[in-house]
Image: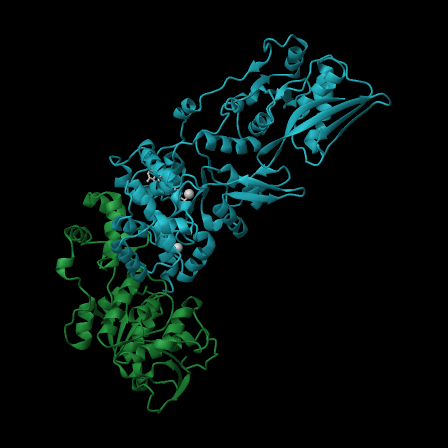
Chain colours: A cyan, B green
Amino acid sequence: MITVKSFGITGVNGYIVDVEVDIAKGLPGYTLVGLPDNAVKEGKERVKSAIINLDYKFPVGNVVINLAPASAKKEGANYDLPIAIGILANTQIINKPMTDWAFMGELSLNGELRRVNGVLPALLTAVEHGIKNVIIPADNYREAAFVSGINVYTARSLGDVVSYFTGDMLEPGPLVQVQKANFDTLLADAVYPCDMKYVRGQFVAKRALEIAAAGGHNIILIGPPGSGKTMLAKCFQTILPPMTFTESMETTKIHSCAGLLDAEHGIVLTRPFRCPHHTASSASLAGGGKYARPGEISLAHNGVLFLDEMPEYNRSCLELLRQPLENHNIMISRAAATVEYPASFVLVASMNPCPCGYYGSRIQRCKCTQSKIQHYLGKISGPLLDRIDLHIEVDQVTYDDLTNDKLAEDSATIRKRVTAARAIQNQRFNGTEIHCNATMDAAMVKKYCMLDGESEKILKAAFENLNLSARAYTRILKVARTIADLAGSEKILPEHISEAISYRSLDRYNRGANE
Amino acid sequence: MNEIKLIHLGDQDYPQALLDLKDPPKQLYVKGNLDLLKRPLVSIVGTRDCTRYGLTVAKDLAASCAEAGFAVVSGLAEGIDTAAHQGAKENTIAVLGNGIDVYYPVMNHDLQEFIGTHGLLISEYPPDFRGGKTTFPQRNRIVAALGQAVIAVEADLHSGTLITIRKAQELNRDVYAVPGNINCYASQGTNDLIANHGAQMITSTDDLVKSLTGRGKKSKKIVPAKQITLEQQNILNILKTDEMHFDDIVLESGLAVPQLSTLLTNMEMIGLIEKLPGNYFVAK
Ligand SMILES: Nc1ncnc2c1ncn2[C@@H]1O[C@H](COP(=O)(O)OP(=O)(O)OP(=O)(O)O)[C@@H](O)[C@H]1O
Ligand SMILES: [Mg+2]
Ligand SMILES: [Zn+2]
């Protein structure tokens, strides 16, 4: 019996799979066991064709393949290559020791290697287990370029792999050894899909987005159709601080498992911006489902989840956000086990101020009654609203503003300020689980958001005079902390509190009708 | 908790003003502070489909009338009625088109509760009567008759408010209307009342109170001049003519966004300006 190493994935983490190949004398047979799903099972036939098409003989006895451990469900086509290697080793085509090697890759019928999902988590697992060499498909090259402590080779075909192992193995020969890439150089060249400088006017919205980015605060934009909500939200990712290497690896792992990396973008370099449509199912948002893929909220890990027209989403989808907003991960129960996907993101939501969209607009008349508006606003439940720190009202910019660009700052400039504010927070929260002001717990708020007498007075007056609801209290303190950080001020000053108060318009809307 | 009381036509507590009606209610169910009926009364009415301007004006007028010693009568409907009751605080009488124990409209549940406790609820229908197509117009005749003056805040050309006003005129009540933007649907009825149907135009809250009481009175709490800073005065000047969007105030004032946000919030809290939906600001 021959054992060849490969990898399986649960959630976004890898584990070692031993591919055991045994050929017994007797009636010809070809079986695959060890909890394979359909894609794995079909691999049997791909492997057979690939071997035959390479002009090697397929063994005549009873071929049994076992994927161990048998308890974990194996998914996907990445076992094709290790199975083929196991068979060829059994038939003595390859007769080198395999203990230091692991393999993953899908085969085409004529033996070409195709890219597979989950390479990054697999390689990280290989490093943990001290595996020295791994062979992966050529199209997965970029994904491997950031894993150190291991030799990774890429191959174009089964033929490449076989000729390497039948040769003297001194030179990579037909294989290509993956060169380590420099993360910081790549990061410097990261391209963003848009820039704040093209957004005209919208001063408050931009300022609020800057605060949201600096403190990791969730934000909702409220405004009539065409007021630029979607545009602003898309630009939000461009003012977030650059990804750290660790963040990039975390997010890449998730995107790798979801099969979203293409050959050119081997890793995720800019913070993801995910905008699931409001008709999206709970499974596509949360993850799981038949093939155990990470959902949209995990794909947004370390980036932005944008819910455009938030009240249009299914109630159950919105409720599902509560856990990740609180714990920064999501647990998915599957038949066999519960898997955990990371899901730490900033939520950016948008909504119209009323069902027709024009409440408060100076351009078109709102046709909604107060009770219809109440009902519409009520679609976003209190507990969800509780987790959104900043509420911003936007209106269409006028023609004058659209044609006047003298005040538009570019994203890079804003990003610098945001990054500086994050540095202060990193120092503040050094040694704790959290990274930014938005995620402070009650004790931290008490410790880091101390107010002087004057600020206390302002906050008290705001609750008395502006109809703020009680839930606004902690939100305002956290946002004021971020505003102070942006200003480089150790203390929260009265002006920081006043500004923070101005970003709570939804509290006041909600009260508007029955104050 | 107040009890519901029943007053019959001819009882001592029965409001004399209703006797001007051809068909005065035979009985009234009441709940709350009956003393309000002894005050001079002003009715404030208007459309449910109103604008922000209407809401603000209704609230301000009601507040000034209450401060000048009037009780404010209205119909507890959405929109202008609601704003009028809110502005008058506990000095208000709501006349219902359904029984007092029925909460309608639902969104005004808390307001109805408040008025039943601190103000006064009136209905000519038994407590659990649910109201119907005709009972709300019927109720309007009581609103028209109770006030010595009736004020229309906003109404389009087809609004039921105009029927209430016509009723008030038949009953020889003083009729006032609030002028508005001629392009705005919600002011077309009220402007028409002023232009063609003899309503007196209200040009300010002071103006109304003076006209109602025959004496002048400052209705607004004016912040003493020394408390207004130069910065604040600058903003007030910018907002002198019209409401303005935040972005435009940035451009006019030359202030940075954080400073302006801070300044506007503070000004709003001391009542110098008001923030409107859509991030617009207006001087008070
Ligand atoms: N401030 C702005 N600067 C530059 N272009 C703008 C601005 N606001 C809107 N636009 C233009 O108008 C288009 C519509 O904006 P956008 O789709 O972001 O609005 P929206 O508020 O999301 O509308 P809807 O509610 O209909 O989805 C944008 O594609 C953009 O080209
Ligand atoms: Mg949009
Ligand atoms: Zn509307």
Horizontal side of B199 relative to B112 (left or right) equals left
Horizontal side of A318 relative to B75 (left or right) equals right
Where residue A325 appears, as percent x and y from the top left, is 48, 46
Q: How many marks?
A: 0
Residue at the outermost right position: A26
On the question of residue A78 being in view, the answer is no
Does residue B15 sit above or below B229 in this rendering?
Answer: below
- Residue at 39% x, 61% y: name it: A370
- Quadrant (top left, top right, bottom left, bottom right) of the C terminus of chain A: bottom left
Horizontal side of A204 relative to B205 (left or right) equals right
Horizontal side of A234 relative to B198 (left or right) equals right
Where residue B34 appears, as percent x and y from the top left, is 33, 83
- Looking at the rendering, which quadrant does residue A206 occupy? top left
User: Ligand 1 shows up in which quadrant of the image?
Assistant: top left
- Looking at the rendering, which quadrant does residue A28 occupy? top right
On the question of residue A166 being in view, the answer is yes
- Looking at the rendering, which quadrant does residue B115 occupy? bottom left
Residue at the outermost front position: A431
Where residue B46 appears, as percent x and y from the top left, is 32, 68
- Residue at 31% x, 74% y: name it: B90
Please tell me which residue lies in front, A236 or A1: A1
- Quadrant (top left, top right, bottom left, bottom right) of the N terminus of chain A: top right
Please tell me which residue lies in front, A194 or B268: B268
Please tell me which residue lies in front, A365 or B237: B237
